[in-house]
Image (spheres, rainbow, N blue to C red):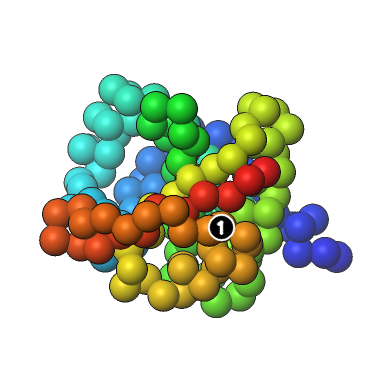
């Protein structure tokens, strides 16, 4: 069975918030906003914002989530994967599936992301996928790279 056959991506629901909150806090050092949030704060955020986040499952198990947002005319994307599932090539496949899906469903022509320069693993992944650097900027006291891919 192909790795793609074991992977699924679906819209995040309220019942996913405990998983999301735990993973988001565990991954906070890789994020621009490195604060940690309580479960209650995450539920409140979900109810207020109705975010367009998507749960990544592998073989029926939740392993990560995609963050999406629109800033002006730009579609931004990001992925956090649980530490037990990193380094297995799943992020590459997940991005390929998700980028293809949003291209078809939402007619998105290009996607953007921002990554901290210290996150070398993510930078290598994004370059492998075909993202190109657009610019560097300081966000707070952290250097960030904005990248783009044509779909």
The location of residue 121, given as percent across then percent down, is: 46, 74
Residue depicted at x 25% and y 29%: 44
Q: Secondary structure at mark 1?
A: loop
Task: Return the residue nearer the eye: 25 or 113.
Answer: 113
Q: In this rendering, does residue 12 appear at all?
A: no
How many callouts does the rendering have? 1
Task: Return the residue nearer the eye: 62 or 68.
Answer: 68
The location of residue 64, given as percent across then percent down, is: 50, 55
Above or below residue 144? Residue 9 is above
The location of residue 61, given as percent across then percent down, is: 59, 56
Query: Which quarter of the rendered picture does the C terminus lie within?
Result: top right
At label 1, counting other C-alpha atoms closer than 10 Å, the crowd grade (few under 14, some 14-19, many 20 or more) is many
Q: In this rendering, does residue 45 appear at all?
A: yes
Residue depicted at x 21% and y 57%: 138
Above or below residue 106? Residue 83 is below
Which residue lies most toward the left here? 141
Residue depicted at x 25% and y 63%: 143
User: Would you say 12 lies left or right of 94 here?
Assistant: left
The location of residue 78, given as percent across then percent down, is: 46, 50
Q: Which residue is mark 1?
A: 131
Query: Which quarter of the rendered picture does the N terminus lie within?
Result: bottom right
Quadrant of residue 127 within the rendered picture: bottom right
Residue depicted at x 14% and y 61%: 141
Task: Return the residue nearer the eye: 128 or 24.
Answer: 128
User: Would you say 96 lies left or right of 141 here?
Assistant: right
């Amino acid at each position: 069975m192909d790795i793609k056959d074991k992977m699924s991506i679906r819209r995040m629901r309220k019942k996913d918030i405990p998983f999301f909150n735990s993973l988001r806090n565990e991954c906070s050092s890789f994020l621009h906003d490195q604060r940690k949030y309580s479960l209650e704060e995450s539920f409140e955020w979900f109810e207020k914002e109705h975010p367009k986040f998507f749960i990544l499952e592998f073989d029926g198990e939740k392993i990560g989530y995609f963050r999406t947002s629109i800033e002006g005319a730009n579609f931004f994307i990001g992925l956090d994967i649980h530490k037990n599932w990193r380094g297995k090539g799943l992020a590459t496949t997940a991005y390929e599936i998700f980028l293809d899906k949003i291209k078809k469903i939402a007619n998105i022509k290009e996607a953007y992301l921002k990554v901290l320069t210290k996150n070398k693993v993510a930078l290598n992944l994004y370059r492998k996928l075909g993202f190109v650097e657009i610019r560097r900027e300081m966000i707070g006291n952290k250097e960030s790279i904005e990248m783009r891919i044509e779909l």
